């Protein structure tokens, strides 16, 4: 099944002192959603932003807000992020004891639910819960920081996941890839079966408005 390629700029690489300006630039470039990286300094070695900032962002844009929770015990914060205006929430396999329960919690709030796999997380996690997810987020770096190098095992992992989804009637589940996505590897990532490309440093390193279009073009044409 051919899915529309969606571009999700990661605000982690935006100017935190003027997020609204960078959000306008993303909108102008035709971004499909905004990827918001939430880090707690516990699950990952970095601290970023929380639900109050998501709420503020929600007030200034109609973009889909895709909240990637890199936090321990995310079940404690699902309601906060849903209340703040999250449209998509993803949680890491290793971040809670009861993954299915947290996914149900997200879905019950009318928010799209995603499971996140680190580069070394067995794909079986996704196989077990894909039917309860709207999307699977495949990390192509170890989470915590922008600007890291892409880990190539993503390609074979993504292909295997895409095959699993299509052979199990789960074509509605989208595959998102996050970490080290650039113009150069975008097409290969899409060919491996992903359709949502998260991109931070690759977009914000120059003119983000222009780069969104260039990334979309690279993803479908190269
Ligand atoms: C990393 C984050 C990513 C990050 C990607 O833990 O989940 O979303 O912003 O940044 P780049 O595209 O620079 O690798
Ligand atoms: Zn992310």
Image (cartoon, grey):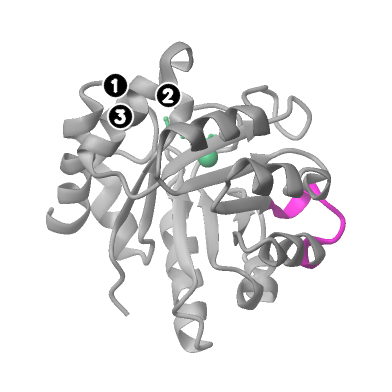
Query: Residue 213: x percent and y percent?
Result: 17, 42
Disc 2 is placed on an element classified as: helix
**Label 2: which residue?**
13
Q: Is residue 88 visible?
A: yes
Contact check, label 2 and label 3, Cβ < 8 Å: no
Residue shown at 53% from the left, 55% from the top: 137
Q: Earlier in the sequence, mark 3 or mark 1?
A: 3
Find out whether residue 94 is within the magenta segment: yes
Q: Residue 80 carries which label?
A: none
The stretch in magenta equals 92-100
Residue 169: image location, x then y, percent: 50, 88
Q: Which residue lies furthest to the top in this view?
A: 17
Closer to us: 37 or 118: 37
Residue bearing mark 1: 205
Q: What element carries label 1?
A: loop
Say if the magenta span includes residue 134. Answer: no
181 relative position to 103: left or right:
left
* Mark 2 lies within 8 Å of ligand 1 (Cβ measured): yes
Q: Do the residues labelled 3 and 1 touch (CB within 8 Å)?
A: no
Q: In which quarter of the image is residue 188?
A: bottom left
Crowdedness near tag 2: few (<14), some (14–19) or many (≥20) residues, C-alpha within 10 Å: some
Q: Name the residue under label 3.
A: 24
Q: Write down the quadrant of residue 56 in the picture.
A: top right
The answer to whether any part of residue 50 appears in the image is: no
* Mark 1 in CB contact with mark 2 (< 8 angstroms): yes
Q: Where the N terminus falls, by quadrant?
A: bottom left
């Amino acid at each position: 099944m051919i899915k529309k390629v969606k571009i999700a700029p990661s605000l982690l690489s935006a100017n935190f002192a003027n997020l609204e300006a960078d959000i306008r630039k993303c909108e102008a470039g035709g971004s499909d959603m905004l990827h918001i990286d939430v880090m707690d300094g516990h699950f990952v070695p970095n601290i970023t932003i929380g639900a109050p900032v998501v709420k503020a962002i929600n007030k200034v844009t109609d973009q889909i807000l895709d909240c990637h929770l890199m936090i321990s015990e995310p079940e404690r914060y699902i309601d906060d992020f849903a209340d703040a205006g999250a449209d998509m929430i993803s949680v890491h396999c290793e971040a809670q004891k009861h993954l299915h329960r947290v996914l149900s919690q997200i879905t019950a709030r009318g928010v799209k639910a995603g499971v996140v796999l680190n580069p070394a997380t067995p794909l079986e996690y996704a196989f077990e819960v894909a039917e309860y997810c709207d999307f699977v987020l495949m990390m192509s770096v170890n989470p915590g920081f922008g600007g890291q190098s892409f880990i190539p095992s993503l390609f074979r992992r993504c292909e295997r996941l895409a095959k699993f989804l299509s052979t199990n009637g789960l074509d509605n589940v989208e595959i998102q890839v996050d970490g080290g996505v650039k113009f150069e590897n975008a097409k290969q990532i899409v060919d491996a079966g992903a359709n949502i490309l998260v991109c931070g440093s690759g977009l914000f390193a120059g003119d983000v408005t222009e780069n969104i279009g260039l990334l979309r073009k690279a993803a479908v044409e190269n």
